[in-house]
Amino acid sequence: MSKKIIQTDKAPAPIGPYSQAVLAGNLLFVSGQVALTPGTGELVTQDIASETHQVMHNIKAILNEAGLDFQHVVKTSIFLSDMGLFGAVNEIYGSYFSGAYPARETMAVKTLPKNVNVEITVTAMVGA
C-alpha cells in the first residue's frame, strides 16, 4: 500500500513530530486540528464558536489539499476540554456536513494541546 504525506500552508504547520495528514491507499487520516491560524500560528480563542470554526477551516484546507471535502469524511473524533461545550461545538460541526454525517465519538479530556477547548481529527475516503 502506498503512503503519501499531505501538507498545505493553508492549515497550521504541525506543532510536533507528525504530518497534517497521511493518505494511505484510499483513506486520508487527518491529524487532530486545533484553532491555530495558518501562517501566524496564533490561537483563535475569542469564544467556542470562533474556535470551532477555525478548527473546521483547518480541516477543510487539508481535505482540499488532498482533493477531498467534508462529503468524503467517514469518521471523526472530537475532543473537548469540557462536555458543557458539546452543544455549541456540535451545532457548528454539523453545519459543515450536508446530511450524510460521518461516524463519530466525542469525549471530554483533561487537557488539550496549547490548552485549547476543542480538537477534531477526521478520516476521509477517496471516492466516497
Image (cartoon, rainbow, N blue to C red):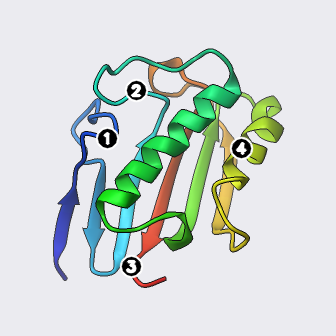
N-term-proximal mark, 2 vs 4: 2
Helix, strand or loop at label 4? It is helix
Q: CA distance from mark 2 to mark 4?
A: 18 Å
Name the residue rendered at 16%, 78% in the picture. Answer: 2
Residue 15 vertical position relative to residue 58 in the rendered view, above or below: above
N-term-proximal mark, 3 vs 1: 1
User: Dot 2 corresponds to which residue?
Assistant: 37
N-term-proximal mark, 3 vs 2: 2
Q: Position of residue 73 (x, y in %)?
A: 52, 68
Residue 128 is labelled as none
Q: Position of residue 30 (x, y in %)?
A: 39, 55
Q: CA distance from mark 4 to mark 3?
A: 24 Å
Helix, strand or loop at label 3? It is loop
Q: Amino acid under label 3?
A: Val
Name the residue rendered at 30%, 58% in the picture. Answer: 65
User: Dot 4 corresponds to which residue?
Assistant: 92
Image position of 15 (left or right of 45):
left
N-term-proximal mark, 2 vs 1: 1
Residue 5 vertical position relative to residue 127 in the rendered view, above or below: above
Q: Is residue 81 visible?
A: no
Query: Contact, CB < 8 Å: mark 1 with mark 4?
Result: no
Q: Position of residue 108 (x, y in %)?
A: 69, 37
Query: Contact, CB < 8 Å: mark 3 with mark 1?
Result: no
Mark 4: few/some/many CA within 10 Å (<14, 14-19, 20+): some
**Number of on-image labels:** 4
